[in-house]
Image (cartoon, helix red, strand yellow):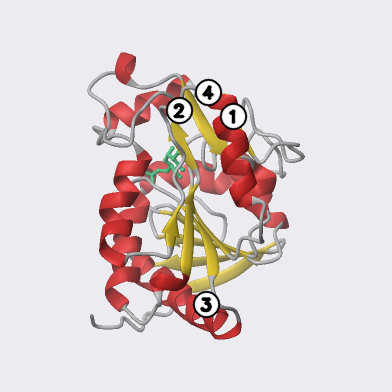
């Protein structure tokens, strides 16, 4: 695949570095190139690496670009995901497990992909099982998207806790998040969207050594402005990235369009 040598507009807000690309394609390519180099460099220093993968539309082009670039030894990567709907089985095409199995696991054959079992009969035990897998060793890298209400993974403003004592928890999804899933054709109607989901908590996400967060399109412009220009608060969970020592936000001109002086 051809490498695009586009230079993004870059600035810093608190500790968060922000890169603005002219288009979503260039954003995906730019983020993929940075992630590729990081993975190659950490696999030079350690035998394997552990990654948290996000889902959602914004990740699609980025994951494709990262896989197509090549050069990463996926057989030394252990993968996890950020969230899953409660009660939804892995074969359901709306599950995040299905998304990641089809878009990533089948294509790159990682060392291991640990999935959250959405349809586990004992959800609290499932949270503990997944937490025990996660907290065994440090997380090297986390991919993130942003919900229109500022959620990261499924840490909705109503349940987000910057000091969460849990690694993984069950949360009630906000109505607006469930509506978005219908608009994106992931579910046929609001009643079909589960009311609850599993999510990695904010401290789990922040424990990653490096965070790559993507937000493209005009629908993210308001939350991007609020999260970067207002105070850091659980009302906009993504704003906490401003306190992470190695977090990077990738925007396109649409999602960045409301930022002051950019
Ligand atoms: C869902 C997922 C999030 C994801 C968000 C953004 O709500 N739970 O983990 O970040 O979607 O999705 P999109 O990229 O489609 O805007």
- Judging by the rendered image, the residue that carries numbered circle 1 is 125
Quickly name the residue at label 4.
Answer: 122
Residue that lies at the very extreme toward the top in this rendered image: 191
Residue 22 percent location from the top left of the image? 35, 67
Q: Which of 212 and 148 is in front in this view?
A: 212
Q: Can residue 58 be seen in this view?
A: yes
Asked whether the residues under the numbered discs 1 and 3 touch, taking CB atoms below 8 Å apart as contact, a structural biologist would say no
What percent of the width, then of the height, locates residue 59?
36, 54
Q: Does residue 248 sit above or below 180 in this rendering? A: below
Kindly identify the residue that appears in the image at 35 percent across and 84 percent down. 5
Label pair 2/4, CB-CB below 8 angstroms: yes
Q: How far apart are marks 2 and 3 (CA)?
A: 34 Å
Residue lying at 31% horizontally and 66% vertically, measured from the top left = 108
Estimate the spatial distance between the alpha carbons at disc 2 and disc 4, rounded to whole Å. 6 Å
Q: On residue 120, which mark appears?
A: 2
Q: Is residue 25 visible?
A: no
Dot 3 and dot 4 residues touching (CB under 8 Å): no
| Closer-to-camera residue (220/68) | 68
At numbered mark 2, what does the secondary structure look like: helix, strand or loop? Answer: loop
Quadrant hosting ligand 1: top left
Question: Local crowd at mark 2 within 10 Å, few (<14), some, or many (≥20)?
Answer: some
Which residue matches tag 3? 38
Mark 2 or mark 3: which comes first in sequence?
Answer: 3
Badge 4 crowding class, 10 Å Cα cut-off, few under 14, some 14 to 19, many 20 or more, is few
Task: Please count the marks in the image.
Answer: 4
Marks 1 and 3: which is nearer the front? 1
Label 2 or label 1, whichever comes before in sequence order = 2
> Sequence-wise, which precedes: disc 3 or disc 4?
3
């Amino acid at each position: 695949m051809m490498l695009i040598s586009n230079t993004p507009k870059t600035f810093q807000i608190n500790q968060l570095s922000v890169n603005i690309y002219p288009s979503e394609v260039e954003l995906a390519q730019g983020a993929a190139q940075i992630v590729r180099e990081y993975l190659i460099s950490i696999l030079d220093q350690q035998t394997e690496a552990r990654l948290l993968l996000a889902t959602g539309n914004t990740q699609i082009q980025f994951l494709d670009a990262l896989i197509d670039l090549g050069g990463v030894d996926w057989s030394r990567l252990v993968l996890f995901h950020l969230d899953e709907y409660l009660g939804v089985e892995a074969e359901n095409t709306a599950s995040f497990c299905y998304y990641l199995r089809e878009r990533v696991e089948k294509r790159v054959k990682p060392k291991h992909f640990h999935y959250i079992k959405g349809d586990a009969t004992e959800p609290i035990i499932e949270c503990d099982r997944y937490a025990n897998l996660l907290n065994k060793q440090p997380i090297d890298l986390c991919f993130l998207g942003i919900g229109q209400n500022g959620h990261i993974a499924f840490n909705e403003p109503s349940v987000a806790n910057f000091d969460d004592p849990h690694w993984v928890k069950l949360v009630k999804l906000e109505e607006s998040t469930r509506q978005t899933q219908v608009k994106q054709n992931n579910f046929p109607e609001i009643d079909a969207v589960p009311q609850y989901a599993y999510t990695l908590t904010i401290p789990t996400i922040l424990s990653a050594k490096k965070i790559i967060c993507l937000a493209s399109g005009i629908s993210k412009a308001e939350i991007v402005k609020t999260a970067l220009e207002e105070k850091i608060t659980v009302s906009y969970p993504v704003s906490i990235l401003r306190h992470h020592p190695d977090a990077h936000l990738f925007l396109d001109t649409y999602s960045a369009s409301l930022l002051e002086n950019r």
